[in-house]
């Protein structure tokens, strides 16, 4: 169900929960969060909208720490000035999910600093901890006469907890689905916040559909994927809802068609049923605002169109294959050593030669088959991961 929020909003607190995507106050937003002047970053109408609900949840996409020692990984290392806790409290955030690919960017010290700061300020967290056992613990809320469970997990990148080390909870189909089933036995309604999906891709991959529908099979009532930095689409499966891509909430790192819009998900509980609403927001001139008028209609219309497209499983597969083809150079380049001479030559040739001929120069058919088998086969992949882990 989608809804455009009108200008007249009831300020009475409702038996509802607000869930937003990535929150990373940097640049001017950092200053506003430290000073508590968050109205300069987030429109007051959104703040009033937040006040209407009983609980507010966000994805804290980076550790709250002053630690300078960062881990070696792919992509940027992110952190948030811990003094930004002033803004989080003013926004009345009740809980954050820490299950994401950046929460360990500044090592176990960065995560420890984050957890201690949240504890001191009575902001609940879920999805990360000092080890695997702690990171998998869910949270429960009593709302609308129902016991609501929140479980947070992430795809495996550089932030995952183990039995002996701190980090985010990584989704493991051989184990996590049983965890979900056990949690559902403890609550009436289960929400899963899954940090998964391909960045800047508005549709789910076939594998992500398998993952999220199995979560529902095991008891989830609502699954929200938060990693893609763009609004995606939604799927009604059995009696549950899956949102494939919520987009950012506040993350002024860059500006483009993907980055500058997102969805607030509002879950309302009453005696009869539970209603899930998606409310579009936009980043306008560096300030997060409710989308209105034709802008809101366009965002929701596109969202609904994509949602209808994924009712066809063949569309999901074909569209993902086309998207994957557009990333071919990027992925093959990694197997040539990243920024080495071979990678530069490959990129240059890709501009002047048909893609297939360029591939044949660098990757003979038997080489591609070997790479394919190393990644596809569980035994080979396990050996490869052990080798690469030992290199760190």
Image: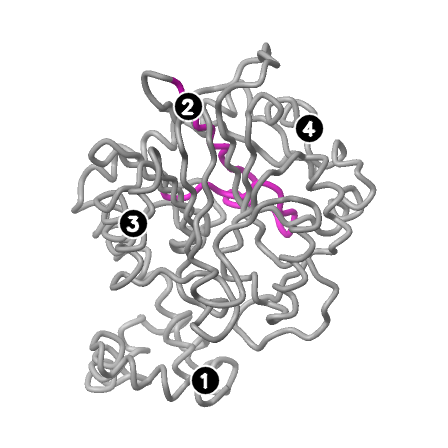
Density class for disc 1 (Cα within 10 Å; few <14, some 14-19, many ≥20) is few
Whether residues under marks 4 and 3 lie with C-beta atoms below 8 angstroms apart, the answer is no
Mark 4, mark 2: which one is toward the viewer? 2
Is 256 on the left-hand or right-hand side of 311?
A: right
Q: Which mark is residue 245?
A: none
* Residue 345 drawn in magenta: no
Q: Find the distance from the CA under tag 4 to the CA under tag 2.
A: 31 Å
Instruction: State which tag comes first along the sequence, 2 or 1.
Output: 2
Alpha carbon separation for disc pair 4 and 1: 45 Å
Quarter of the figure with the N terminus: top left
Quadrant of the rendered structure where residue 368 is? bottom left
Q: Give the mark nearer the N terminus: 4 vs 3.
A: 4
- Dots 2, 1 in contact, CB < 8 A: no
Q: Label 3's element?
A: helix
Which numbered disc, 2 or 1, marks the residue closer to the eye?
Answer: 2
- Residue 43's disc is 4
Report if residue 255 lies within the magenta region: yes
- In the picture of the structure, the residue carrying the numbered disc 1 is 337
Determine the residue positioned at 27% across, 34% down. Answer: 240
In the rendered image, residue 337, in percent from the top left (x then y), is placed at 45, 84
Please tell me the numbered disc located at residue 145.
Answer: 2
Give the mark nearer the N terminus: 4 vs 1.
4
Task: Give the label on residue 182, or none.
Answer: 3
Query: Residue placed at 56% from the left, 61% from the top?
Result: 103
Vertical comparison of 312 with 382: above or below:
above
Instruction: Say which element carries label 2.
Output: loop
What element does badge 1 sit on?
A: loop
Earlier residue among tags 4 and 2:
4
């Amino acid at each position: 169900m989608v809804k455009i929020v009108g200008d007249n909003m009831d300020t009475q607190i409702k038996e509802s929960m607000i869930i937003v995507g990535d929150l990373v106050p940097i640049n001017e937003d950092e200053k506003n969060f430290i000073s508590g002047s968050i109205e300069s970053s987030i429109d007051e109408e959104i703040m009033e909208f937040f006040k209407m609900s009983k609980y507010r949840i966000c994805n804290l996409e980076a550790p709250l720490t002053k630690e300078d020692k960062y881990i070696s990984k792919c992509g940027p290392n992110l952190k948030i000035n811990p003094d930004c806790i002033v803004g989080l409290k003013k926004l009345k955030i009740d809980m954050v999910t820490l299950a994401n690919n950046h929460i360990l960017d500044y090592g176990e010290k960065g995560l420890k600093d984050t957890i201690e700061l949240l504890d001191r300020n009575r902001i609940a967290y879920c999805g990360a901890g000092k080890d695997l056992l702690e990171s998998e613990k869910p949270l429960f809320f009593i709302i609308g006469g129902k016991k609501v469970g929140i479980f947070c997990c992430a795809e495996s990148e550089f932030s995952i907890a183990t039995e002996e080390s701190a980090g985010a909870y990584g989704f493991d189909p051989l184990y996590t689905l049983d965890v979900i089933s056990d949690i559902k036995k403890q609550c009436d309604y289960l929400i899963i916040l899954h940090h998964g999906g391909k960045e800047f891709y508005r549709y789910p991959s076939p594998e992500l559909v398998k993952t999220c529908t199995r979560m529902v099979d095991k008891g989830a009532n609502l699954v929200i994927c938060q990693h893609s930095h763009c609004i995606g689409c939604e799927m009604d499966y059995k009696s549950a809802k899956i949102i494939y891509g919520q987009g950012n909430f506040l993350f002024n790192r860059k500006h483009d068609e993907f980055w500058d819009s997102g969805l607030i998900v509002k879950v309302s509980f009453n005696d009869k049923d539970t209603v899930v609403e998606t409310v579009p927001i936009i980043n306008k001139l560096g300030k997060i605002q409710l989308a209105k008028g034709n802008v809101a209609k366009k965002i929701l219309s596109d969202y609904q169109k994509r949602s209808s497209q994924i009712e066809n499983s063949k569309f999901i597969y074909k569209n993902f294959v086309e998207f994957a083809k557009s990333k071919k150079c990027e992925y093959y380049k990694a197997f040539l050593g990243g920024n080495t001479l071979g990678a530069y030559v490959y990129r240059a040739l890709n501009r002047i030669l048909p893609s297939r001929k360029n591939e044949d120069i660098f990757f003979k058919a038997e080489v591609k088959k070997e790479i394919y088998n190393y990644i596809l086969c569980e035994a080979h992949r396990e050996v490869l991961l052990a080798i690469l882990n030992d290199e760190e």
